[in-house]
Image: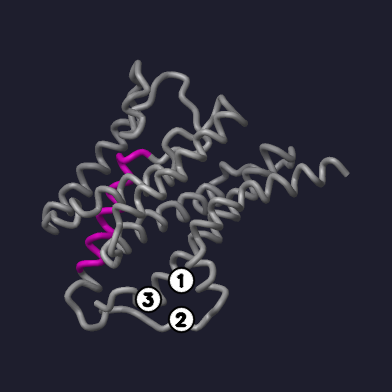
Amino acid sequence: MTPGKRYGEIDLLRAIAIVLMVLFHIVYDLREFAGININYQDPIWFLVGKTAALLFIFISGLASGFSRSPVRRGFKVLLYGMAITVVTYLAMRDIYVRFGILHFLGVTMILSTFLYSLSSRMLWALAGVTALLGFWFKGLVIETSLFLPFGLMYKGFGSMDYYPLFPYISVTFLGILAYRHWYDQRPEPLWAFQLDSKPILWLSRNSLMIYLVHQPLILLIIFSIRLL
């Protein structure tokens, strides 16, 4: 495949993910910080938020196959995640972000070189095992916070954003498998299209920046309106 080439289907999925993520966070912030009676835990809003996160994870696994330096990008994303940890700890200590979506994406990008070295058969097996482990871990409570990145929670744990490696790394494995099936070693992907939409391309190219700034902007607008 051509290094640096853009694929319209990937840009479209990434743009959908960021729009869904922003929409979910608007609903969450309106309930938590503006007191508006809207339940972000309703199935439809839960589906919106979860779909956004799963798309980001899937695309990250797939796109690492195109990246020249996924490990360096992973450390950058993880650093942003740690910054969010510090900010949310200072602002809302009880539910601050300890291992959120950016922590997850950063770690899996750092591991991507190793993960891409695994056989497809091994990746399918690991996808199943990690998914099962993650659902099993949800029912367990331990005495330490050391295993939070793996999905093992302690009594009283709470976080406004939590995406542990188990079960979600199974979606990363699916992204790697999609890269191998649709893109790797092919002059053209099996399924692709050209995208000429400037708004969608802009959303895709700036998805990380949008993710980082949209929450502070939403909260600034909410608190500004409340002060009027």
Q: Position of residue 135 (x, y in %)?
A: 31, 37
Residue type for callout 3: Tyr
Instruction: Say the numbered circle drawn on residue 7.
Output: 3
- Contact, CB < 8 Å: mark 1 with mark 2? yes
Q: Position of residue 3 (x, y in %)?
A: 29, 74
Tell us which disc is closer to us: 1 or 3. 3
Circle 2: element type: loop
Residue marked by disc 1: 12
Spatial distance from mark 3 to mark 2, Cα to Cα? 8 Å
User: What's the magenta region?
Assistant: 164-180
Work out which quarter of the rendered image holds the N terminus and state it: bottom left
Residue marked by disc 2: 195
Query: Which corner quadrant of the image does residue 199 belong to?
Result: bottom right
Residue type for callout 1: Leu
Work out which quarter of the rendered image holds the C terminus and state it: top right
Query: Which corner quadrant of the image does residue 61 belong to?
Result: bottom left
Q: Nearer the viewer, residue 143 or 129?
A: 143
Circle 1: element type: helix
Q: Position of residue 89 (x, y in %)?
A: 55, 29
Q: Position of residue 221 (x, y in %)?
A: 74, 49
**192 left or right of 204 in image:** left
